[in-house]
Amino acid sequence: MGLDVAASILKRRATKVFDAAYRMPDADLDTILGLARRMPTAFNIQNWRFLVVTDPDLRRQIRTVAWDQPQVTDASALLVLCADIRAWEKEPERYWENADQSVRDFMVGAIDQYYRGREQVQRDEGMRSCGMAAGAIMLLAESMGYATCPMDGFDFAAVAELIRLPSDHEIVMFVAIGKAAAAPYPTGGIMPEKDIIFANRFS
Ligand SMILES: Cc1cc2nc3c(=O)[nH]c(=O)nc-3n(C[C@H](O)[C@H](O)[C@H](O)COP(=O)(O)O)c2cc1C
């Protein structure tokens, strides 16, 4: 790993033009996804699912429903970050397999109590998990000399069909990873601190 976290944050930009000829070693993607999975999820339910689209034909089809954005086909890796909305009820013991039996029993009960019947929370939680994973993926990639583009500019329903998304999953976003082939546009602008950071109450 090269850059530290602060340097990776400052260097990262949403990259629009990738070197389509560049092949990223599988080991690098394994490293990125292995480490991204160490980000936190509520109750450790690990409700993120990372779909790696390697099939060039499928990438071309996805591009047609993604405003023809070239990142979809030209980045070395196209990740579709998805949430398994019902992960909370799928063998929840496995999320606490390293814990003592009493802790495991407690957590399994707490997970059920927290999520059952709360569809909005189940979905929101998937967005939180994948959002954090996406951040980690982009910074890890940056630290390894890659550029990235976070994306939600696509037809979610059409992509769901193309990737055969299970009915209890939701697509959260794409992250494209590869070698940048053009300098980024100037940064759009950073809002003043007073409009973003607040103390104690909003008013
Ligand atoms: C959730 C999300 C979705 C985005 N979707 C797209 C996209 O579809 N295409 C694109 O070119 N950029 C996309 N962007 C990039 C943003 O426009 C970009 O991150 C923002 O303008 C800030 O610029 P920077 O990332 O270069 O600092 C997306 C960013 C986020 C966080």
Image: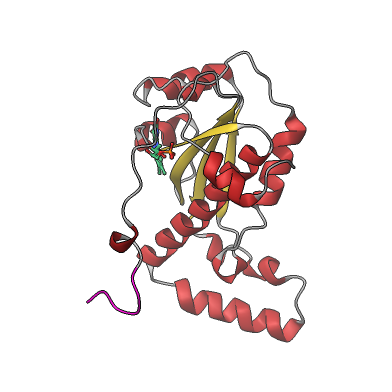
Q: How is the image coloured?
A: secondary structure
**In the foreground, 126 or 9:** 9
At which x and y percent is residue 65? 37, 25
At which x and y percent is residue 152? 39, 38
Residue 140's image quarter?
A: top right
* Residue at x 44%, y 46% (from the top left corner): 172
Instruction: Report the side of 168 relative to 44 (left or right).
Output: left
Q: Is residue 85 visible?
A: no
Q: Quadrant of the C terminus?
A: bottom left
Q: Quadrant of the N terminus?
A: top right
48 in the magenta segment? no
Q: Main secondary structure of the magenta part?
A: loop
At which x and y percent is residue 68? 38, 19
At which x and y percent is residue 156? 37, 37
* Residue at x 60%, y 59% (from the top left corner): 46
In the image, the segment drawn in magenta is 198-203
Q: Residue furthest bottom?
A: 102
**Residue 64 against residue 141 in the figure, above or below:** above
* Residue at x 74%, y 27% (from the top left corner): 25
